Image (spheres, grey):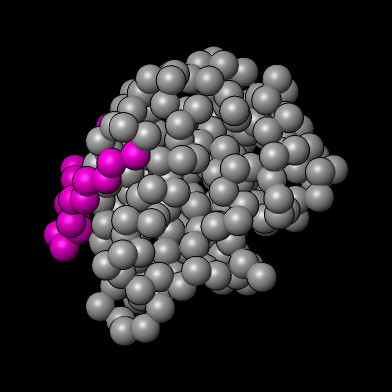
Amino acid sequence: MAGRWLAGWMVLVLWIGPPSRCAGAATGIVQCEGQTYTYLCLRSSVPGPRPAILLLHGAGDDPKNMVEAWSSLAAREGIVLIAPALPRTPAFEAMAPRVFRCVLEEVARTTHLDSRRIFVFGNSMGGYLAYDALAFLSDRIAAVGVHAMGIAPEYDGILDQADRKAPVAIYIGDRDPLVPLAGIRRTQNLLERRGFPTRLTVLEHHDHDYYAVSGPVNADAWAFFRLHPRP
């Protein structure tokens, strides 16, 4: 998988983020692989098939904070937000793509999702899992966005599992103390060599704090996603 917790970059982040405010977001429960998982879903009131973003939070963070960070943009654009609670156990990473599939299927039972416009955005630890989704859910997702995370060299092989080369947008601060810019550039080169259309944005004077830049990053990621529906 894309890198066990603490593997490769040796990153342990206890970022809690801003106060949680997710009015209108409903908590869901799904059974997958014999276990129970929870998620938040903020549904759009716009009729018809809607785009969706699977939001993957960082270590020590909360799905509510991710939904809150995207909620204004989602309201304007009619986006369905889906944010699973991510266990901080190494065993979860091997199951993560299957759990994401279960969550998406559960939401699709009650919400009319546009199957060509299902995207993934992950922050930090969630970025590890976003790369897993890129590799193992290529039949379901259209494009991926990642803030502050790359692929550790020992997990480069996951990209061989992808049936489709989905586009990737990566965001990294030039002052991130936890994730070296050199490693992110290596990830960009790796993805491009393997045929994944990749765009890297280096944020000046920015560290590891996603919520400090979530407004412009989310807007840019959404503009990127809109250009890349699944064929």
How many discs appear?
0
Direction right: furthest residue: 193
Position in image of residue 229 (x %, y %)? 60, 70
Which residue corresponds to the image point at 81% horizontal and 43% vertical from the top-left? 194
User: Compared to 36, does 171 lie above or below?
Assistant: below
Q: Quadrant of residue 36?
A: top left
Tell me: 188 left or right of 43: right
User: Compared to 45, does 149 lie above or below?
Assistant: above
Q: Is residue 182 magenta?
A: no
Q: Is residue 40 visible?
A: yes
Which residue corresponds to the image point at 34% horizontal and 39% vertical from the top-left? 32
Position in image of residue 91 (x %, y %)? 43, 20
User: Compared to 174, does 119 lie above or below?
Assistant: below
Tell me: 222 left or right of 160: left
Q: Quadrant of residue 30?
A: top left
Position in image of residue 211 (x %, y %)? 37, 44
Front one among 177 and 168: 168
Front one among 66 and 82: 82
Which residue corresponds to the image point at 68% horizontal and 33% vertical from the top-left? 158
Which residue corresponds to the image point at 42% horizontal and 64% vertical from the top-left? 52
Stretch of the chain drawn in magenta? 15-32
